[in-house]
Each structure stands twice: as structure tokens, then as C-alpha cells.
Image (cartoon, rainbow, N blue to C red):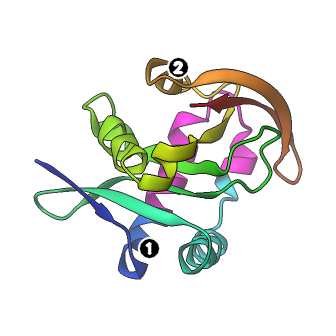
């Protein structure tokens, strides 16, 4: 059984651990190991604490044992080069729990929010992200492209809108 609920401060350590795990596993085929190995827990914790205390709404997916197996966040459009009020900031599911409908449940939680229903949402997805088809299968359409600066490397993003 999977429970979807709003995320809170107590969830942040598990959110950050899951984020780093997902990047290190899902993106290892196209991002350098040196970059993935430098992902810093404290930096990510500070980043997500700022988001949770400010512009972002988080939802988490947990098992009946209260293990966090996925999370998502959204807020006002920060910088997408398209005319949407809302941006999907994150959507991650533990690699051991992917393809079980958890991503669908998390996306449905966001799409259930009144402001999203009124105006839609956009998301930037790395072009080489092996999970990119998830967005296409859930009604997002590619509308633009942009480069994302990750510090010592840049990647191509596809901008989707729904």
C-alpha cells in the first residue's frame, strides 16, 4: 500500500537521500561519475529546506511501513521559457519502486491542486533522462528546449507543458 500526503520538514532528510540515490542510479549513463559522486547531502538539504519554507509544495509517497519511496514538488514558474504559472520542480521515485504507479500517484496529487487545474503546469526534463517518457505518457507535450547549467557541466533539457 502506498500513501500520498503533503510533505513536511520531517521528510526532508529522506527526500534528500532519495534525490541523491535517484540521480546516482538513473543518470549514471549520461552524467559523469565524478559529478554524481560530489552530490552533497547538506547542500541539497539546505536547498530543499528553502524550497519547502518558501515557494514549493511537496507531496511524498510512503509505504505502509512509512518508508519514503517517492516525492514531488511544484511551485510558481521559476524560469521555464514558456508561459505557464506553475512548474513541476521534482518528481522522483526510488529506482527499486519504479514502474509500480507511484509516479502516477504523485503526479495526480499535484494535478489535483486547484491552481494547477486552472492553469496547467510545465516541467524541464533532461533530454537523456531515461524516465522522460513518463511525462509524454501522462499528457505532457514537448514545447521548447533549453540548456541547464549544473556548475561544471551543462545538459540539454526538454520543456514540457500540460
Could you tell me which residue is drawn at 80 percent across and 51 percent down?
79
Q: Residue at x 51, y 39 (%)?
A: 25
Residue 82 percent coordinates (x, y): 78, 37
Secondary structure type for disc 1 = helix
Work out whether residue 124 or residue 162 is closer to the camera in this orientation and state it: 162
Q: Nearer the viewer, mark 1 or mark 2?
A: 2
| SS assignment at label 2 | helix
Residue position for label 2: 136
**Type of secondary structure dominating the magenta stretch:** helix
- In the displayed structure, does residue 19 sit left or right of residue 109? right
Magenta span has 76? no
Range drawn in magenta:
16-36
Which quadrant of the rendered structure holds the C terminus? top right
Q: Is residue 72 visible in the rendered structure shown here?
A: no
The answer to whether residue 55 is above or below residue 76 is below
Residue 127: x, y in percent?
70, 25
Which of 137 and 153 lies nearest the eye of the viewer? 137
Q: Looking at the image, which residue is at 81% across and 35% down?
A: 155
In the image, is residue 150 above or below residue 126?
A: below
How many neighbours does mark 2 have within 10 angstroms: few (below 14), some (14-19), or many (20 or more)? some
| Front in this rendered view, residue 137 or 26 | 137
| Mark 1 and mark 2: Cα distance apart in space | 30 Å
Q: Which residue is mark 1?
A: 13
The label on residue 98 is none
Left or right of residue 81: residue 58: left
- Report whether residue 24 is seen: yes
Label whose residue precedes the other's in the sequence (1 or 2) = 1
Crowdedness near tag 1: few (<14), some (14–19) or many (≥20) residues, C-alpha within 10 Å: some
Q: Is residue 24 magenta?
A: yes
Amino acid at each position: 500500500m502506498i500513501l500520498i500526503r503533503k510533505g513536511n520538514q520531517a521528510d526532508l532528510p529522506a527526500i534528500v537521500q532519495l534525490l541523491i540515490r535517484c540521480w546516482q542510479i538513473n543518470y549514471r549513463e549520461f552524467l559523469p561519475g565524478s559529478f554524481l559522486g560530489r552530490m552533497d547531502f547538506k547542500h541539497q538539504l539546505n536547498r530543499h529546506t528553502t524550497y519547502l519554507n518558501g515557494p514549493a509544495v511537496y507531496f511524498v509517497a510512503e509505504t505502509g511501513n512509512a518508508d519514503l519511496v517517492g516525492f514531488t514538488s511544484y511551485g510558481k514558474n521559476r524560469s521555464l521559457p514558456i508561459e505557464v504559472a506553475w512548474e513541476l520542480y521534482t518528481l522522483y521515485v526510488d529506482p527499486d519502486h519504479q514502474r509500480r504507479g507511484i509516479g502516477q500517484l504523485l503526479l495526480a496529487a499535484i494535478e489535483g491542486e486547484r491552481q494547477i487545474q486552472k492553469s496547467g503546469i510545465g516541467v524541464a526534463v533532461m533530454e537523456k533522462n531515461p524516465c522522460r517518457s513518463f511525462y509524454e505518457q501522462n499528457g505532457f507535450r514537448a514545447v521548447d528546449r533549453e540548456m541547464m547549467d549544473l556548475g561544471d557541466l551543462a545538459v540539454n533539457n526538454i520543456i514540457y507543458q500540460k
